[in-house]
Image (tube, rainbow, N blue to C red):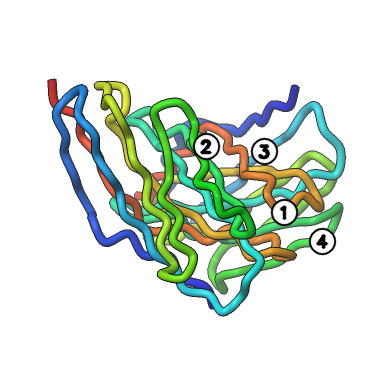
Amino acid sequence: AQTVTQSQPEMSVQEAETVTLSCTYDTSESNYYLFWYKQPPSRQMILVIRQEAYKQQNATENRFSVNFQKAAKSFSLKISDSQLGDTAMYFCAFLQGGSEKLVFGKGTKLTVNP
Amino acid sequence: SQTIHQWPATLVQPVGSPLSLECTVEGTSNPNLYWYRQAAGRGLQLLFYSVGIGQISSEVPQNLSASRPQDRQFILSSKKLLLSDSGFYLCAWRFTGGNNSPLHFGNGTRLTVT
């Protein structure tokens, strides 16, 4: 079974600085998809960014970008110019191609300090 | 556009009482539907998912059950709640057949079993 590991339970960053959240996954498949979700204190789950494994180019969404290292099975999230509103739990998720089940990591609690 | 409704937002129930959480999706047909549970300080655990009316896949053997009586309605139930059923329950949907289609979540139900 696929597993997703987020090794940083908590992190903090100063406003306007850059922070990187780590995620590794375990799979023997070559066709899969990766996602980062954000869960602010309101607990609403919000999609931040997604990456297809067959794409070599790293996905980018405004201040959010990923570093996808397929050989290392690593999918880190970089947040640039951190804002107070970025304070949230961040979850990495894995979806195997052809499967209907997204597997989530345990999350990283990010605090952006003023 | 698609929307997902989940209710109630909060619920306090005594041990041994029944449970019914409801989720509906608007603006799409034949979505895949999911129930996740998030225990305090932990990641998301997939409980059930459904790819069509009457089709339920159970991921974790437990005190809960799910049903999909209509195309866009997903219900989480229990005949007798346990203390361990307390948690934050999230309903989600995604497009059928789109492997990179992300999950879209409802606002969640905070269940406290006393």
- Please determine if labels 1 and 2 lie on a single subunit: no
Q: Residues within 10 Å of mark 1 (few under 14, many from 20)?
A: some
Instruction: Give the foreground label among 3 and 2.
Output: 2
Give the answer, above or below, for where A17 lies relative to B95.
above
Which chain letter matches label 2? A
Give percent across and percent down for residue B57.
71, 66
Give percent across and percent down for residue B35.
60, 51
Residue B66 bears which disc, if any? none
Is the residue under label 3 in contact with that under label 1 (CB below 8 Å)?
no
- Please determine if labels 1 and 4 lie on a single subunit: yes
Q: Secondary structure at mark 2?
A: strand
Is the residue under label 4 in contact with that under label 3 (CB below 8 Å)?
no
- What residue is drawn where x is 46% and y is 73%? A26
Residue A82 versus residue A98: which sits nearer the camera? A82
Res. A76 in view: yes
The amino acid pointed to by label 3 is Cys
Res. B15 in view: no
Residue A47 bears which disc, if any? 2
Q: CA distance from mark 3 to mark 4?
A: 16 Å
